[in-house]
Image (tube, rainbow, N blue to C red):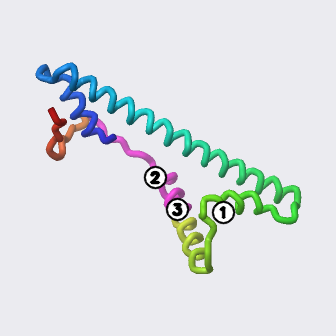
């Protein structure tokens, strides 16, 4: 949910003309949205933990001189249909990885410069209205 949507909901809730039934409908919708977001987060955490476990097992297998140390990570990527399929995909993935590493290094080098004094607030765009 965007900041603008939160602001619209706050304004709708603060409006004295809003009826109790409307508030109940908004509350139910927000609870449904929250439950959906929590389920998405749980799925993403599961995928992350599986990938992290596979990466750690791959490194451990390499240290132990296992015959196929990449088996763990290959299996995890194959289950998600994320294995590179041909030479072109391999080169593109390597290029993307090098670019991402370079961008991260650049971001880490720059110091964050914070403006001094008061911060100006901007309002951009027209607000949306909730149905009545």
Numbered disc in front, either 1 or 3: 1
Q: Residue at x 57, y 67 (%)?
A: 98
Q: Residue at x 29, y 38 (%)?
A: 3
Q: Residue at x 63, y 67 (%)?
A: 83
Q: Quadrant of residue 126?
A: top left
Determine whether 8 is above or below 98 in the image: above
Which numbered tag is attached to residue 110? 2
Q: How many marks?
A: 3
Q: Nearer the viewer, residue 62 or 23?
A: 23
Query: Between marks 3 and 2, how big is the CA–CA gap?
Result: 16 Å
Q: Which x, y percent locates residue 100? A: 52, 62
In contact (CB < 8 Å): disc 3 and disc 2:
no
In contact (CB < 8 Å): disc 1 and disc 2:
no
Q: Which residue is mark 1?
A: 78
Secondary structure type for disc 1: helix
Q: Is residue 70 magenta?
A: no
Query: Between marks 1 and 3, how big is the CA–CA gap?
Result: 23 Å
Numbered disc in front, either 3 or 2: 3
Secondary structure type for disc 3: helix
Q: Which x, y percent locates residue 79? A: 65, 59
Q: Which x, y percent locates residue 58? A: 76, 56
Q: Quadrant of residue 46?
A: top right
Q: Which residue is mark 3?
A: 100
Q: Residue at x 72, y 53 (%)?
A: 54
């Amino acid at each position: 949910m965007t900041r603008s949507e939160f602001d619209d909901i706050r304004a709708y809730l603060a409006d004295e003309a809003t009826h109790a039934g409307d508030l109940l409908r908004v509350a139910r919708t927000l609870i449904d949205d929250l439950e959906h977001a929590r389920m998405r987060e749980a799925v993403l955490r599961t995928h992350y933990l599986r990938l992290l476990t596979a990466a750690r097992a791959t490194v451990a297998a390499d240290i132990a001189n296992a015959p196929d140390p990449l088996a763990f990570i290959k299996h995890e990527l194959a289950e998600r249909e994320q294995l590179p399929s041909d030479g072109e995909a391999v080169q593109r993935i390597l290029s993307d990885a090098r670019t991402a590493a370079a961008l991260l290094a650049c971001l880490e080098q720059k110091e964050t410069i914070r403006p001094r004094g008061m911060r100006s607030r901007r309002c951009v765009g027209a607000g949306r209205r909730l149905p009545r």
